[in-house]
Image: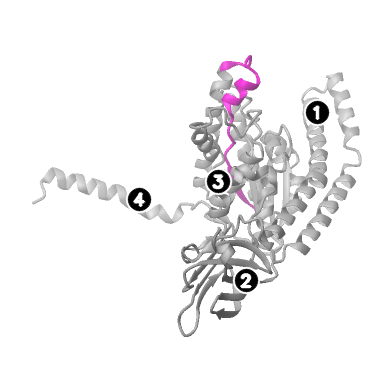
C-alpha cells in the first residue's frame, strides 16, 4: 500500500515530467555527422592556428583520400591574430562568398586576451560570436563550433620565465570556460561541435607521465604538426565521418572460397595449393600525412582508428606467407596472423600508401604555396579593417587617419591577387584529383620460400 505522503510526492513528480515530455519535440539535436555530397563547400574559419594551414591540410588529406569521387570545396579562412570581431569584418568575402554548407569556427585564443578570466572580455567574445553565428545562419550554412585549443603553461614558462605567472597559470582554464560556453550553445541551438581542448590536454597529460618535458605546443599557443594531427582527428571523430578504409575476409578450404569485403570490390579470386590471389578495387585510399606529422599519427593511433585496411585469410596451411600487391612484396606473415587479420594502412611499402603519400605531399605544396599566400592577403585586410574601425571611432585623430591610409594602400589590388591564389590552389587540386583515384590492384598471398620461412 502506498502511503498518502508518498502518493502525493509521486503525483508531483509525474506532473513535473509532463511539460518536459510535451516540449521534447521542440528541443534541438546537436549535429551528429556531416552530410556531404559532391560540390559541397566547407569553410574553416579561425585565427593563426587555422592560418598555420596544418590541421585544415590534414583534414583535406582525409577528404581527398576517403572520398576520391567527391570533390568538395575546402576553404581555409584563418587569419593570424584574429578575434571574433575580425571574422565578422571579412565575413562576406572570406566566408559567405564560398557558399558553405558547413563553417567550422576556431576562435577564442586571442579573444581571451592571454590573461586571467575577465567578465567584460568574455562578454565581448560572446557578443561577437553570437553575431557571427547569426551571420552563418543567415546564409543557410551550418555552424560547427570548436573549442579553443590548449594553452600550454609549462611550455610558456620554459619559453619565457618572466611571463606574468598568473596569466600563465590560469589562461588554459580561461579557454576551457570559453569552450564550455560554446558547447552549451551548440547543444542548445543544434549546431555541430568539436572538442579541441580536451584531446590536446588529455594526451599531453598522458605522455608527460613518461616525458615530463613533452609538448605539442612549443610556443604555448600554436600546436606543432603532431598537435595539429590531434585537432584533425578530433574533427573526423566528433563529426561522424567514416573510419574504416576496407576489410577483406576470405575463407578457404570449402568447395568455393567464401568472401566478405567492405570498402571495395573483390574479383578474380584464385585459390591454389600455396595460397591465393585476387583483384581488389578499393573505394578509397588510406589517410596518410606528411612526415612532420608522424608523431601525431602515432599518438592518436590515427591509422588503426580512422584508416583501417584489414586483410583476413582463413584456411591456409600452417606456415609463413608472403603478401604482395601489384608484385610489390609488402610483408611476410605466419598463417595465424593472417587468420587474426593484418592491417596495411601504415605499411609504407604498399602501393596504396605511396599513392596516398603523394596526395599528401602535393597538398602540402598547395598549402605552403597559394593557400599561405592567400591568407597573407587577408592578414593585410585584417590590419586595414582594424585601422578603419579605429579611425571611425576617432574621426579627429590624425594618426589614426594616416594609419588607415597606409593600410588602404596595402590592400590595393587585393581582389585580383586573391583570385590568382585561388586559381593557383585550384590548379594543384586538379592534379590531386588526377592521382587520388584508387586503381584495381592484384593481391597475391603465397607460401613463403624456405629461406624466408626461417626468418
Span highlighted in magenta in the image: 141-165
Q: Is residue 21 left or right of residue 371?
A: left
Tell me if residue 72 can be seen. Answer: no
Sequence order check: which comes first, mark 3 or mark 2?
A: 3
Find residue 175 and report its horizontal and vertical position in percent: 56, 31
The 10 Å Cα crowd at callout 1, few under 14, some 14 to 19, many 20 or more, is: many
Q: Which residue is mark 1?
A: 387
The 10 Å Cα crowd at callout 2, few under 14, some 14 to 19, many 20 or more, is: many
Q: Which mark is residue 19?
A: 4
Tell me if residue 320 can be seen. Answer: yes
**Residue shown at 69% from the left, 40% from the top:** 50
CA separation in Å, label 3 and label 2: 29 Å
What coloring was used for the rendering? one colour
Find residue 352 and report its horizontal and vertical position in percent: 67, 62
Q: Which mark is residue 443?
A: 2
Instruction: Give the secondary structure at mark 3.
Output: helix
Quadrant of image for the C terminus: bottom right
Q: Which residue is mark 3?
A: 300
CA separation in Å, label 2 and label 1: 62 Å
Sequence order check: which comes first, mark 1 or mark 4?
A: 4
Find residue 103 and report its horizontal and vertical position in percent: 65, 49
Comparing labels 3 and 1, the label whose residue is closer to the camera: 3
The 10 Å Cα crowd at callout 3, few under 14, some 14 to 19, many 20 or more, is: some
Sequence order check: which comes first, mark 4 or mark 3?
A: 4
Comparing labels 2 and 1, the label whose residue is closer to the camera: 2
Find residue 354 and report its horizontal and vertical position in percent: 70, 58
Amino acid at each position: 500500500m502506498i502511503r498518502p505522503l508518498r502518493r502525493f510526492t509521486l503525483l508531483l513528480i509525474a506532473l513535473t515530467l509532463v511539460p518536459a515530455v510535451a516540449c521534447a519535440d521542440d528541443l534541438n539535436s546537436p549535429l551528429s555527422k556531416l552530410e556531404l555530397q559532391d560540390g559541397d563547400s566547407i569553410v574553416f574559419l579561425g585565427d593563426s592556428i587555422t592560418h598555420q594551414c596544418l590541421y585544415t591540410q590534414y583534414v583535406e588529406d582525409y577528404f581527398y583520400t576517403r572520398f576520391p569521387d567527391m570533390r568538395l570545396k575546402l576553404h581555409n579562412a584563418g587569419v593570424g591574430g584574429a578575434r571574433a570581431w575580425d571574422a565578422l569584418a571579412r565575413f562576406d568575402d572570406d566566408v559567405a562568398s564560398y557558399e558553405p554548407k558547413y563553417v567550422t569556427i576556431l576562435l577564442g585564443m586571442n579573444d581571451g586576451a592571454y590573461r586571467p578570466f575577465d567578465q567584460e572580455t568574455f562578454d565581448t567574445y560572446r557578443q561577437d560570436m553570437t553575431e557571427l553565428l547569426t551571420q552563418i545562419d543567415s546564409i543557410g550554412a551550418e555552424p560547427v563550433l570548436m573549442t579553443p585549443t590548449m594553452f600550454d603553461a609549462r611550455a610558456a614558462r620554459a619559453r619565457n620565465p618572466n611571463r606574468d605567472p598568473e596569466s600563465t597559470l590560469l589562461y588554459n582554464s580561461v579557454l576551457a570556460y570559453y569552450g564550455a560556453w560554446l558547447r552549451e550553445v551548440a547543444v542548445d541551438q543544434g549546431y555541430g561541435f568539436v572538442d579541441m581542448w580536451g584531446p590536446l590536454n588529455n594526451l599531453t597529460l598522458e605522455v608527460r607521465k613518461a616525458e615530463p618535458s613533452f609538448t605539442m605546443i612549443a610556443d604555448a599557443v600554436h600546436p606543432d604538426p603532431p598537435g595539429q594531427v590531434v585537432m584533425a582527428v578530433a574533427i573526423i571523430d566528433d563529426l561522424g565521418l567514416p573510419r574504416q578504409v576496407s576489410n577483406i575476409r576470405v575463407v578457404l578450404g570449402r568447395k568455393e572460397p567464401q568472401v566478405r569485403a567492405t570498402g571495395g570490390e573483390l574479383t578474380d579470386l584464385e585459390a591454389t595449393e600455396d595460397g591465393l590471389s585476387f583483384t581488389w578495387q578499393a573505394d578509397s585510399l588510406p589517410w596518410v600525412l606528411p612526415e612532420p606529422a608522424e608523431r601525431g599519427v602515432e599518438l592518436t593511433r590515427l591509422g588503426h582508428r580512422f584508416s583501417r585496411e584489414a586483410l583476413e585469410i582463413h584456411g591456409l596451411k600452417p606456415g609463413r606467407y608472403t603478401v604482395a600487391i601489384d608484385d610489390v612484396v609488402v610483408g611476410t606473415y605466419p598463417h595465424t596472423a593472417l587468420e587474426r587479420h593484418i592491417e596495411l594502412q601504415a605499411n609504407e611499402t604498399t602501393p596504396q600508401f605511396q599513392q596516398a603519400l603523394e596526395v599528401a605531399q602535393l597538398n602540402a605544396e598547395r598549402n605552403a604555396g597559394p593557400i599561405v599566400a592567400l591568407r597573407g592577403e587577408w592578414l593585410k585586410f585584417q590590419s586595414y579593417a582594424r585601422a578603419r574601425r579605429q579611425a571611425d571611432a576617432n574621426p579627429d585623430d590624425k594618426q589614426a587617419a594616416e594609419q588607415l591610409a597606409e593600410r588602404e594602400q596595402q590592400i590595393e589590388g587585393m581582389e585580383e591577387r586573391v583570385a590568382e591564389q585561388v586559381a593557383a590552389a585550384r590548379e594543384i587540386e586538379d592534379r590531386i584529383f588526377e592521382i587520388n583515384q584508387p586503381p584495381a590492384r592484384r593481391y597475391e598471398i603465397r607460401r613463403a620460400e624456405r629461406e624466408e620461412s626461417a626468418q
